[in-house]
């Protein structure tokens, strides 16, 4: 049996037909019969790194939160601290960044809680008994919540290929040590001295000080300190740092999916997922910039099925015509894979197939438009 995925078109010609009102109605439909009055609701989103503007606009969260409150839910906005250095590395900086980007009581009527605590060490160890992990470290506030509402800005990702709800949960709902367990021993950066300009951006953004400049002012890696987070790859302006895979590129995605399994283990019937297919950039909102969209804006999806909503998102994006003034190099036609074009070493299908294999959802889906 196919899983229903609700679709909100971006077309509108009156107030009732506005995108905001359609998102509100879709959220209400998905909450009905699942949310109980008094439930503590973790609304998982990404507040965006300083310098990025691709994150979901707070006004959408306001309409989503209203539906939760109308049903007696007690929502809070949440995310976890990052593995890499930046403005979301600890709860103080993280909350200041969220406020800077417009997420506060003046715009969204819900408190903000950083789910894994002040320094990212507040978690529950959850038994999962999967291929790569027996236990995973789920952020405390997310684990203790009664209901998980995941709101995701869909985009590309340097390691996962696709950054959808699976990644938002598997990477975004776990403690910093859980993030490191996913990244470790999957790849090591390999700086190209011919391309390196000695700008030090990789050094500044490395969370473990594994990078430095040699006597010729070229980047070098101390491999025993590297945790494989690939921040250096993202921040290098010249492409001097490429990924040297020490194992299959699918390994990180499988580890990520297993962490998502741990997060959802006791919430399979107490969760829902909303994917925004807007400002579809090649890279994560963790970057301190936002590149041009790969395709035109498409719409907003909602589902109870994690696998179905991410696959539907990828399918709709790949069916779209690619934008010429973007990072795409060849996949401009409808039906060509946009994510493999911009991240050829990271096949996003791995996370979809593995998530279905371990019981997180169904690749058979049907779209239903919200009117």
Image (spheres, rainbow, N blue to C red):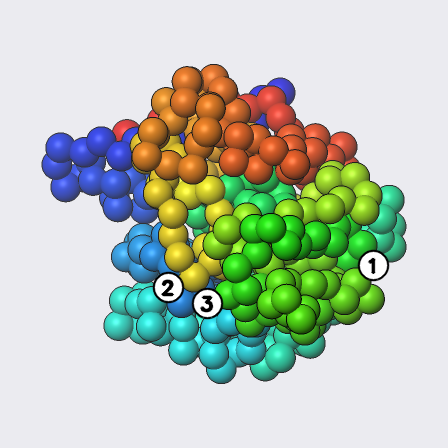
Instruction: Name which of mark 1 and mark 2 comes first in the sequence.
Output: 2
| Image coords of residue 357 (percent x, y) | 76, 32
| Image coords of residue 22 (percent x, y) | 29, 39
Tell me, yes or no, whether the two marked residues, 3 and 2, touch with CB atoms within 8 Å: no
Instruction: Quickly name the residue at label 2.
Output: 51
The residues bearing labels 1 and 2 have C-alpha atoms spaced at a distance of: 35 Å
Q: Report the front residue among 64 and 318.
A: 318
| Image coords of residue 313 (percent x, y) | 48, 32
Residue lying at 58% horizontally and 46% vertically, measured from the top left: 158
Relative to 45, say whether 4 is above or below: above
Instruction: Quickly name the residue at label 1.
Output: 135
| Image coords of residue 220 (percent x, y) | 69, 63
* Residue at the left extreme, as displayed: 14
- Quadrant in the picture for residue 297: top left
Q: Tag 3, which secondary structure?
A: strand
Q: Report the front residue among 141 and 225.
A: 225
**Crowd tier of the residue under label 1, counting other residues whose Cα lies within 10 Å: few below 14, some 14–19, many 20 or above:** some
Image quadrant occupied by the N terminus:
top right
Q: Tag 2, which secondary structure?
A: loop
Instruction: Name which of mark 3 and mark 2 comes first in the sequence.
Output: 2
Determine if residue 230 is in view. Answer: yes
Instruction: Name which of mark 1 and mark 3 comes first in the sequence.
Output: 3
Relative to 145, say whether 111 is above or below: below
Determine if residue 275 is in view. Answer: no
Image quadrant occupied by the C terminus:
top left
Residue lying at 46% horizontally and 42% vertically, measured from the top left: 282
Relative to 211, say whether 57 is above or below: above
Instruction: Quickly name the residue at label 3.
Output: 76
């Amino acid at each position: 049996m196919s899983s229903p995925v609700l679709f909100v078109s971006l077309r509108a010609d009156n107030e009732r037909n506005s995108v905001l009102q359609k998102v509100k109605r879709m959220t209400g439909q998905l909450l009905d019969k699942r949310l109980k009055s008094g439930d503590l609701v973790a609304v998982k989103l990404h507040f965006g790194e300083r310098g990025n503007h691709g994150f979901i606009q707070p006004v959408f969260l306001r309409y989503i939160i209203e539906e939760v409150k109308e049903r007696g839910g007690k929502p809070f906005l949440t995310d976890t601290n990052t593995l890499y250095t930046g403005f979301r590395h600890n709860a103080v900086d993280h909350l200041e960044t969220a406020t800077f980007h417009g997420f506060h009581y003046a715009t969204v009527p819900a408190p903000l809680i950083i789910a894994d605590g002040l320094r990212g060490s507040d978690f529950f160890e959850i038994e999962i008994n999967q291929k790569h992990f027996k236990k995973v470290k789920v952020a405390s506030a997310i684990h203790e919540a009664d209901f998980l509402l995941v709101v995701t800005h869909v985009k590309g990702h340097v390691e996962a290929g696709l950054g959808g709800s699976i990644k938002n949960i598997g990477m975004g709902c776990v403690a910093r040590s859980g993030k490191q367990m996913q990244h470790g021993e999957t790849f090591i950066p390999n700086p190209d001295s011919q391309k390196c300009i000695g700008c030090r951006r990789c050094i500044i953004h490395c969370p473990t000080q594994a990078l430095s400049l040699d006597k010729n002012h070229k980047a070098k890696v101390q491999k025993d300190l590297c945790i494989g987070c690939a921040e250096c790859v993202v921040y290098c302006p010249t492409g001097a740092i490429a990924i040297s895979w020490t194992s299959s590129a699918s390994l990180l995605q499988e580890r990520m999916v297993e962490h998502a399994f741990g997060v959802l283990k006791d919430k399979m019937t107490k969760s829902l997922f909303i994917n925004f297919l807007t400002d579809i950039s090649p890279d994560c909102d963790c970057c301190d910039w936002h590149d041009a969209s790969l395709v035109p804006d498409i719409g907003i999806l909602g589902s109870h099925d994690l696998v179905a909503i991410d696959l539907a998102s990828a399918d709709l994006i790949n069916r779209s015509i690619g934008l010429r003034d973007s990072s795409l190099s060849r996949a401009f036609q409808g039906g060509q894979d946009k994510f493999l074009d911009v991240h050829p070493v990271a096949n996003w299908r791995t996370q979809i197939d593995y998530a279905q294999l371990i019981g997180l959802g169904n690749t058979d889906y049907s779209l239903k438009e919200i009117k």
